[in-house]
Amino acid sequence: QLVVQFTEERGLITLGWIHTHPTQPCFMSFVDLHTHSGFQCMLPESFAVVQCAPQCNPNFGIFRLTDPPGLQTILECRAKEAFHPHPDPYRSPVLPIYTDAPDKGHVQMRE
């Protein structure tokens, strides 16, 4: 509630969120997918930044759920346990659950 109050009082919007994987490589976990679906449902342009262990390459990534099929797949998921798989509804590598946001022109990186 404090974050919502802070942003509303200043006329800001939340474009996404950042989190760490200090011991894991750069990817969106099952928990991350569910967390991000709430952001992307409210703001389709939202993205997730993952900062991972320094020894990993790449050591960060910017991701978003595909739409379709990723966003709907996660929103319809009813699994109770935190860590659970999400099958690709189309079973196609062309339509994954999530994607790198910079690769699709959604986020532009600048020096």
Image (cartoon, rainbow, N blue to C red):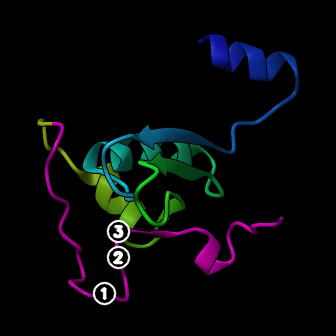
Label 3 to label 2: alpha-carbon separation: 4 Å
Frontmost residue, 19 versus 35:
19
Residue 62 lies left or right of residue 84; in this view the side is right
Crowd around label 1: few <14 · some 14–19 · many ≥20 (10 Å):
few
State whether residue 25 is above or below residue 78: below
| Disc assigned to residue 93 | 1
Contact between labelled residues 2 and 3, with CB atoms less than 8 Å apart: yes
Q: Name the amino acid, label 3.
A: Ile
Q: Do the residues labelled 1 and 3 touch (CB within 8 Å)?
A: no
Quarter of image, res 110: bottom right
In percent of width and height, residue 14 lies at 69, 37
Q: Give the range drawn in magenta.
A: 82-111
**Number of numbered labels in the structure image:** 3
Image height of 92 relative to 13, above or below = below
- Residue kind at label 2, given as amino acid type: Pro
Magenta stretch: residue 39 in it?
A: no
Residues at marks 1 and 3, CA–CA distance in whole angstroms:
9 Å
- Residue 60 horizontal/vertical position (percent): 53, 56
Compare residues 27 and 89 and report the one nearer the observer. 27
- What residue sits right under mark 3 in the picture? 97
Q: Which residue is drawn at 41% across and 55% down?
A: 55
Give SS at disc 3: loop
Amino acid identity at mark 1: Pro
Task: Please say if the residues under marks 2 and 1 sit with CB atoms less than 8 Å apart.
Answer: yes
Helix, strand or loop status at disc 2: loop
The part of the image, by quadrant, that contains residue 91 is bottom left
